[in-house]
């Protein structure tokens, strides 16, 4: 699955539940996340979309493929911000912005939502 497909899937589920998703390709603000979202109730934030295409059965380590400047931006920004990672046919929503996890358990500690498909529970997590 590509980041473009992840965006399309997230935009579809958000539009069904009172949300909007905006693609943000920003070449000036280095590290700015891919997307900004908002809900009718005023909740909004940023989501960096990531995918790891190589599937590994019984994965032991995780390296999130951040580009230069992304971790710094995510750590500096004070509002709602998340990373939505698609890996091994599962979605993971993270609130921590670590590049390398030495164990799968340490990775899962930073996951606040996971699922095989995007659903209302993911949207509840994004609303905060």
Image: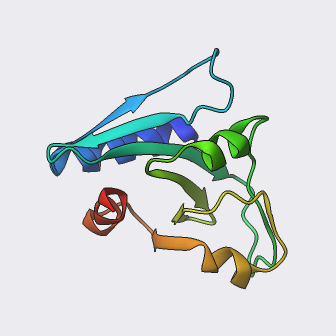
Camera-nearest residue between 104 and 55: 104
**Would you place residue 99 above or below residue 79 in this image?**
below
Give the residue drawn at x 39%, y 63%. 117
Q: How is the image coloured?
A: rainbow
Reply above or below: 83 against 105. Answer: above
Q: Could you tell whether 73 is left or right of 83 in the image?
A: right
Q: Which quarter of the rendering shows the C terminus? A: bottom left
Residue 85 in the figure: left or right of residue 127: right
Q: Position of residue 114 (x, y in %)?
A: 47, 71
Where is residue 61 shown, x and y percent of the image? 81, 73
Say if 89 sits above or below 78 in the image. below
Q: For the view shown, which residue lies furthest in the top direction?
A: 28
The foreground one among 12 and 71 is 71
Q: Position of residue 124 (x, y in %)?
A: 28, 64
Q: Quadrant of residue 108?
A: bottom right
Q: Nearer the viewer, residue 47 or 61?
A: 47
Q: Residue at x 75, y 57 (%)?
A: 54
83 on left or right of 68: left
Count of marks, rendered view = 0
**Residue at point 30%, 69% (across, down):** 121
Q: Position of residue 12 (x, y in %)?
A: 28, 43
The residue at 72%/80% (across/down) is: 106
């Amino acid at each position: 699955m590509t980041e473009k497909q992840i965006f399309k899937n997230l935009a579809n589920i958000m539009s069904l539940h009172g949300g909007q998703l905006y693609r943000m390709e920003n070449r000036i603000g280095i590290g700015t996340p891919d997307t900004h979202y908002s809900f009718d109730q005023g909740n909004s934030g940023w989501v960096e979309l990531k995918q790891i295409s190589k599937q590994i059965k019984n994965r032991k380590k995780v390296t999130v493929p951040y580009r230069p400047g992304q971790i710094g931006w995510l750590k500096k920004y004070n509002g709602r911000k998340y990373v939505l990672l698609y890996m091994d046919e599962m979605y993971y929503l993270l609130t921590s912005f670590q590049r390398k996890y030495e164990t799968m358990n340490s990775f899962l500690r930073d996951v606040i939502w996971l699922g095989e498909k995007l659903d209302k529970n993911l949207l509840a997590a994004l609303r905060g």
